[in-house]
Image (tube, helix red, strand yellow):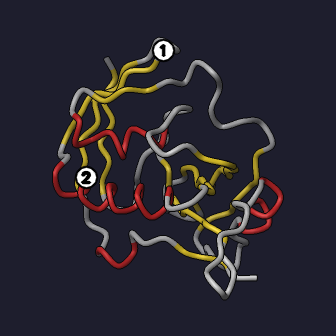
Amino acid sequence: MKELSVRGTVPLMFVVASVLAVTACSASAAPQAPLGDTALRDALPTADALPRFKATAQKAPLLEKQDIVTADKAACRPIADMMNVRPKHPRKALVWATLDGADTAEGGSLALSSFAGDGADAWMSELKVARTDCTEFTATSKRGWSFRFTVEPSLPSRRATTRSRTS
């Protein structure tokens, strides 16, 4: 089994640098369809937004059918769901980019997801709890891999929020 330590801003998804949950709602709060791949791809950060990194949008799927991931501890499921093709709160769309670090910055990946209804709010609430209740876990995939993760949260709570788009 391989081990990966997740510290501060060097997070998951084989080193995911950030996760942003995006939902769509109108000014009247009437629900609209979740954002699709094109809208999410347009929301990927540019070099100006991440000055120490070069983000490169990826066209290949991030997750495949066999990427069904489980965590050995229930408190850690929201974190493991970042790697899961069948998360508790199903995604309506998912896009990703690789991040190449400049100078001494480490690289990684960035994933943007959209959810229907209150899926994004529910998942982000569960992630906030997992940041404190989950210190380590083993994630196992039907693809055949297993990793031991150590989670050391250091991001302030205000960063783990959902963002809404209005039309």
From what the image shows, is residue 19 above or below residue 136?
Answer: below
Give x and y (percent) for residue 80: 38, 38
From what the image shows, is residue 124 above or below residue 158?
Answer: above
Q: Is residue 35 left or right of residue 52?
A: right
Give x and y (percent) for residue 148: 28, 29
Q: Quadrant of residue 24?
A: bottom right
Q: Quadrant of the C terminus?
A: bottom right
Q: What amino acid is at disc 1?
A: Lys
Residue occupying the far top of the picture: 144
Q: Nearer the viewer, residue 36 or 111?
A: 36
Residue occupying the far bottom of the picture: 27
Mark number displayed over residue 51: none
Q: Is residue 164 left or right of residue 56?
A: left
Q: Nearer the viewer, residue 69 or 156?
A: 69
Residue depicted at 29% across the width and 75% down the height: 156
Q: Residues within 10 Å of mark 1 (few under 14, many from 20)?
A: few
From what the image shows, is residue 103 above or below residue 149?
Answer: below
Sequence-earlier tag: 2 or 1: 2
Mark number displayed over residue 130: 2
From what the image shows, is residue 63 above or below residue 52?
Answer: above
Give x and y (percent) for residue 20: 54, 63
Q: Quadrant of the N terminus?
A: top left
Which residue is under mark 1?
142
Residue depicted at 34% across the width and 62% down the height: 125
Give x and y (percent) for residue 112: 62, 57
Q: Is residue 140 left or right of residue 64?
A: left
Camera sees residue 92: yes
What kind of element bears circle 2? Answer: helix
Residue depicted at 54% across the width and 24% down the height: 67
Residue depicted at 67% across the width and 88% down the height: 27
